[in-house]
Amino acid sequence: MSEDMSAYPLRLEGDDVPMVRFMNVTKSYGALVVLDSLDLDVAAGEMVSVIGPSGSGKTTVLRMLMTLETINGGVIYVDGQPLTHMEKNGVLVPASEKHLRKMRADIGMCFQHFNLFPHMTAVENCMEAPVHVLGLSKKEARERSLELLQMVGLEDKVDQHPSRLSGGQQQRVAIARALAMRPKVMLFDEVTSALDPEVIGEVTNVIRELVDKHNLTMLMVTHQMGFAKEISDRVCFFFGGKIEEQGSPDELFGNPQKERTQQFLSAVMEAG
Amino acid sequence: MGFDWRWDFTFEILPRLLLATLNTLLAAGLGYAIAVVLGLVLALAQRTPSRVLTRAVREVVEFIRSTPLVLQIFFVYYVGPQFGIRLSPWTSGMIAIGLHYASYLSEVYRGGLESVPKGQWEAARALNFSTARTYFRIIIPQALPPSLAGMGNYLVGIFKDTPMLSVIGVAELMHTANAIGSESYRFLEPYTLVGVIFLLISLPTAALIRVFESWVRKKLGLI
Amino acid sequence: MSYFEYLAEFGPRFVDGTIITALQTVLAAVLAIFIAFVAGLMRMSPNPLIRGIATVYIEIFRGTSLLVQLYWIFFVLPLFGITLEKFTAGFVAVGMNLGAYGAELVRGGILSVPRGQWEAALALNMSPTKRMIRIIFPQALLNMLPPWGNLLIELLKGTALVSLISVSDLMFEAKQINSTTFLSIQAFGTALVIYYVMARFAITPFMRWLERFMSRKLGRA
């Protein structure tokens, strides 16, 4: 695929540079197009929820931003800098691993299945990357981790291995682990989907506190419409690899314009 | 000749056999050390993005695994001199047995590495670990416990295969028993003692390996 | 001497050796399968004596080396009045050794059949023998086929040791040819390739075919 890269700026400049910009981003697996020419901006400090039926490409948006997936077309920018590409002799070329490692420092992610490291305790999970990626001293990393574990309400579980923790507790450790890297952008990929109903609140409370007290840019894929409505600055409804409709929670949930949005929302509301 | 176990002869040859047992253990230990390291290289070589390398290493591993070790021992020992390289029995024996078991262990490692969930790689990536650090801190510690049973089996396996080294004259247990047999024309005692010595070492070792395995799991907090 | 000339001269001897190796493999396999089923079932017996005998057999043959067992059977057994000719001693040793490993596969295969199958057969008032033969065995057999494929390759490799008691198998021929020509790469290399071909293009495809055949029979394909 040869795309004319001159259409994309080497970096974004000006007063209103978004924290994240997807510019004409396409992702496909063979003939299957998962995302089709996606354009999406997320402003600094904004909380954007991504909803939609399964297979609509919503999780792929987060995975591309975390560079877990490569893209087939377009460019993603983070904090004005190209993420998926880098400048070489005045043009954008696909990013090297070195460039990706530099850029990934700004992004943190929490997964549906937590993906905690099972052979490390809660605090070791949180310390591992600050010590070995950021180069913090063990003491510093431990202090930072303990502070975060306290924030998520797990100060009494710091020395437990994941196998001794409930799903809700594991997900809170995962959030602390991601925050310990001090990212500018946090990604939440269906973080409550694998949890028992009675512990979902533990996790959503933590995210709520993040929104209230910290100036993080956040992107959240979720099936919990009530939580998305309460917490988001903006909600994007994905359908068939495109943003079908987006707007403030009140607009999108209260007065959806597109038929597909209405159908999806009524189906979800009916289900519970 | 009838069945007559001679205890005086038994005690006469026992010290010699026990001394040879040390050589057997040394051969097994050295061979295993080579296999453990080389096996990891063979396993990791099959995980590189290069399709050609993966395919080539796979074929080599398959070839080594499906041909007899005793023939490989001969091959390594006799092929050198054809090119003017003379390898001692010990050196060629260690190369052959190390390589043979490396190919087995590479399969064990491969299984272990593949058993680590994909999410662990993604979490390591999201935390910005380098590939090397991801392997050593995250993936290998988790791939280890499921590999331990297989690794233990092959430790006992390599020990039991060391008698084959006698064919090129490595002075291990079997070689010594053969020598005693041809000097004294008595086979009952030396061959039976060799069998007993093997049993007395391999059975407790197998049991110890199982204990070690559960100890490692506990140590890593996996149970 | 080119490799072509080499093969023209020694090819027939490699073929002879290969035939002996194939014979040893088939005979040892038949014996190993028989022993594996007998010892495997004995290990699951409720009678501690029967279980004990099987356990001792399995532990002895798995706990010592095939080469030790081969020498013992060939050189020591005659002292007890049992003299086996070298060809027989060869496949008997290999078969008895691999049979001990096979017994564990049989046991594992039977244990892998879900408990519900036993209970269903019991609920239909089948006799213990019927339960085993009609219900459990066919399923167990299919489950244990893949590891048997590996075991048969181990068995083929094991037969190379019979050359050490002068059975003129492939390994033996290779050694003999090597000691007259000193062309070691040719002698041992050719033998290695033949063993590889037997494992990869005879045993493996045969086991695959057997698996497909069995799963069709059991309606799982």
Image: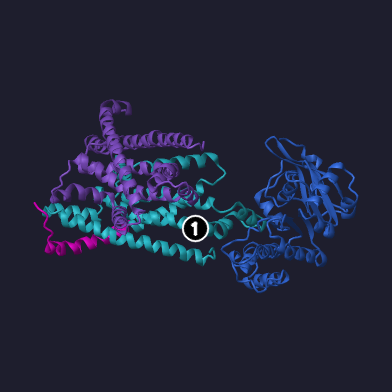
Chain colours: A blue, B cyan, C purple
Inspect this view and state whether residue C80 appears. Answer: yes
Horizontal relation, residue C76 to residue C104: left or right? left
- Pick the residue in front: C117 or B82: C117
- Confirm whether the magenta stretch covers residue B174: no
- Confirm whether the magenta stretch covers residue B23: yes
Give the vertical position of A75 relative to A195 (above or below).
above
> Is the stretch drawn in magenta largely helix, strand or loop?
helix
Q: Position of residue B4 (x, y in %)?
A: 11, 57
Question: Image point 84% across, 42% down: which residue?
Answer: A260
Question: Image point 54% across, 50% down: which residue?
Answer: B114
Tally of numbered tags: 1
Residue farthest along the front direction in this orientation: C125
Horizontal relation, residue A153 to residue C6: left or right? right
Q: What element carries label 1?
A: helix
- Pick the residue in front: C157 or B90: C157
Chain ID of residue with mark 1: B
Tell me the magenta residue range. Answer: B1-27
Question: Image point 19% across, 52% down: which residue?
Answer: B178
Q: Position of residue C2 (x, y in %)?
A: 32, 28
Task: Kindly identify which residue carries mark 1.
Answer: B144
Residue farthest along the left direction in this orientation: B1
Q: Position of residue A228 (x, y in %)?
A: 81, 56
